[in-house]
Amino acid sequence: MADVPNFKVTIDNITVEVPAGTTILEAARKIGGDIAPPTMCYYSKLKGSGGKCRTCLVEVSKGSEKDPRPMPKLMASCRTTVMDGMEVKNITSDRVKDARAGVVEFLLINHPLDCPICDQAGECKLQDLGYDHGKAGTRYEFQRRTFPKHNLGDKIQLHMTRCILCYRCVMTAEQLTKKREHGVVDRGDHAQIASYLDQHLDNEFIGNIIDVCPVGALTDRTFRFKNRVWFLKPLNAHRDCPTCSGKVTIWNRGDEVFRVTARKDQWGEVEDWICNECRFEKKKTSDWVIEEVSPVSRHSVINQNKYFNLDKPKETIDEIIGKKPRLFLDIHNVSKVNEKNRDLSMIEGPANSKDFKNKQQ
Amino acid sequence: MKLLLDKAHIEGIRYYDVWKKNGGYQSVEKALKMAPEEIVEEVKKSGLRGRGGAGFPTGLKWSFIAKPEGVPRHLVCNADESEPGTFKDRYLMEFLPHLFIEGMIISSYALGSNTSYIYIRGEYAWIPDILEQAIAEAKAAGYLGKNILGSGFDLEIYVHRGAGAYICGEETALIESLEGKRGNPRIKPPFPAVQGAWMRPTVVNNVETIATVSPIIMIGGEEYGKIGVGKSTGTKLISACGNLNKPGVYEIPFDLSVEEFIFSDDWCGGIPKGKKLKACIPGGSSVPILPANLLLKTAKGDTRLMNYESLADGGFATGTALGSGGFIVLDEDQCVVKHTYTLARFYRHESCGQCSPCREGTGWMEKILLAIEKGKGKLSDIDLLWDIQRRIEGNTICPLGDAAAWPVAAAIRHFRDEFEWHILNPDEAQTHNYGIAHYADPLEIAV
């Protein structure tokens, strides 16, 4: 590909040179930092993904050197290729910020916001997006759309209520496996991911749909409610696997392997797809050769100090319910997590009733 | 002057024999003696604009089609006429199928498509049979099949039945559906003219556009371009419905005024029981609604005519669009809030659910409008509706998002006090409606 010309593109006043055919999003990721638009549906490893969630909308203020007209509409940066001399506004454009806040609001109106009981919390893309671009309050006053939970086989659970219909899992199944066994049925806001007559998803690579899911809609049944991701230590490990590369991240607490996922890059995208056996069956430290501690990406919501100066809602629980709540166990007083300037990584585990008793005495 | 419906009154015109006796298939014979490029040139000269709603020049669209070596090209006719209020294509296909087939043959020849498709909506359950019969008759007469009239041009036309989805009227969703997939609009580019059905160059045209090609060839592109006003050339089918004495499909010249169209006895014959005109949607449900005063006269005070430019005069602030020609008239007894709710419910139901602003926004708007309609709304809901539609419009993959946002925006823009009255008088709003707004400037029509 030596004859592909390089195009100069300016994103938020930073110029970068990329080969022709690159999307605006990939060019922005080359610059990195806040310039890279958030993505909910785009996945660089999946062909044809993107364009659906509309969080990566950017303003093209100059089409190209040859045709300097601005594009009238905001463009989905994940599906728009760069032209030579293109000028793009992302975080410097008020229009983009407004549209993005709108998209976040739209994505959240039917989302259950059950982060406290969701396994994805802490590594959820929607959580990040909500914190970064959303508002504290909602203007939605109606009942949220719900679906019953479905087990897609004994390893994967589908919690459709949380789904944002990014189509990533459908594309993963389409492109990774020989036969796709699930898809999107119905349309509009009652569209849902479903398998034919609740059949099991049965393919040795189907576990990857858990990794690509940006929210907690597809969760690992061998890991559900076992632990919080921020209490686990991610370790890069490998084993000789006959079906896949065997390069994974194991999530340990002590010596116990709580879950196995594929390794993810700095954009939260899977580097190597892994097979079901590695993911679901190998839950002993002795199964794995541990290489190193995984570099923890700093994009996550649970990453300490990221939202240090965040405005908290002014109303307290007391004001909302009109009286002091009667607590069975005031976990907030004894939990070390809530102490000011506490380094979260130094905490051994969640507060438990033993801490409470110690403090009482 | 009638170009499309001039033979519609003849009994049995649906059948080949009668059609042929009345000068049918002459345009095909004429066209097949021309070069394909000449036909494209004629259509360009005619100034024909797409009749499906967007009004994009057809000749220009045809000239965009990519012509890579060895790759077949396709013409797909969009007969998925699902816009509420629009039923002109149904009339054409049901009563003049051979005119339509003629247009299909000529257009396919001009584009070099040897396999053309008619994608027809599922709700038109009886029309595919009519079309298939017409295709069989044309084939028996040698106008379809191999080596048509010795010109060396082969053509097969297939009728594809849709399953009943508004979204499949969007050209890329239509192509997906034609391929047998879920009818989700594709992200453009690539445009269908480069990569359409089965990744081959494809042109998608409305039924009326294709049917119009036949008279263009007969009278010549230049002659056709002289009919009409400015850039609105030729004639247009309008399907008039709502509170009218004579609803139906009319072929109108573009210099007809809106007032004459509604009230003249030659056309729709006024509003029943001598009621007053309140509002009108002149181009199918997705174009902005206009109150009577702005409908009949533009903001500048000129008489509004039934053509692309005049209806769009003043932009969306004081104008609307000709759209697909679904002319819906509301009299003084109609409630704009309820009407807007009905449209919002339709768009919520028909949103494909692919991109988030449309999927979530349409449902949200519907719920707010239902609350207002049921007398449970708040004044802040009106601003919220405005904010929602503003954030849907232009931020979606396909124009359905815009189509869902515009009616709500226009209803609030022009009928805000009716919304406020609904919210402030919830009990009254359940028993009777607002009537004509003071600014609607009702016309006094002698009964």
Image: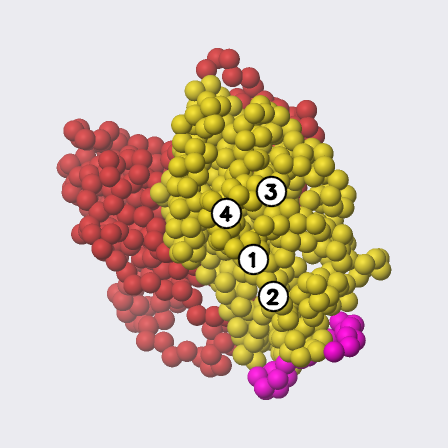
Chain colours: A red, B yellow
Q: CA distance from mark 1 to mark 2?
A: 12 Å
Q: Look at mark 1 in the image and give the residue it sits on.
A: B86
Q: Position of residue A215 (x, y in %)?
A: 38, 51
Q: Look at mark 3 in the image and give the residue it sits on.
A: B212
Chain assignment, label 1: B
| Mark 4 or 2: the one toward you | 4
| Mark 3 or 1: the one toward you | 3
Chain assignment, label 3: B
Chain assignment, label 2: B
Residue B396 visible in the current orientation = no
Q: Residues within 10 Å of mark 1 (few under 14, many from 20)?
A: many
Q: Secondary structure at mark 4?
A: helix
Q: CA distance from mark 4 to mark 2?
A: 27 Å
Residue extending farthest front: B21
In the visual, does A278 lie left or right of B152? left
Of residues B65 and A10, the one nearer the viewer is B65
Specify whether disc 3 shares its chain with disc 1: yes
Q: Look at mark 2 in the image and give the residue it sits on.
A: B247
**Quarter occupied by the C terminus of chain B:** bottom right
Chain part drawn in magenta: B425-447
Q: CA distance from mark 3 to mark 4?
A: 20 Å
Q: Look at mark 4 in the image and give the residue it sits on.
A: B18
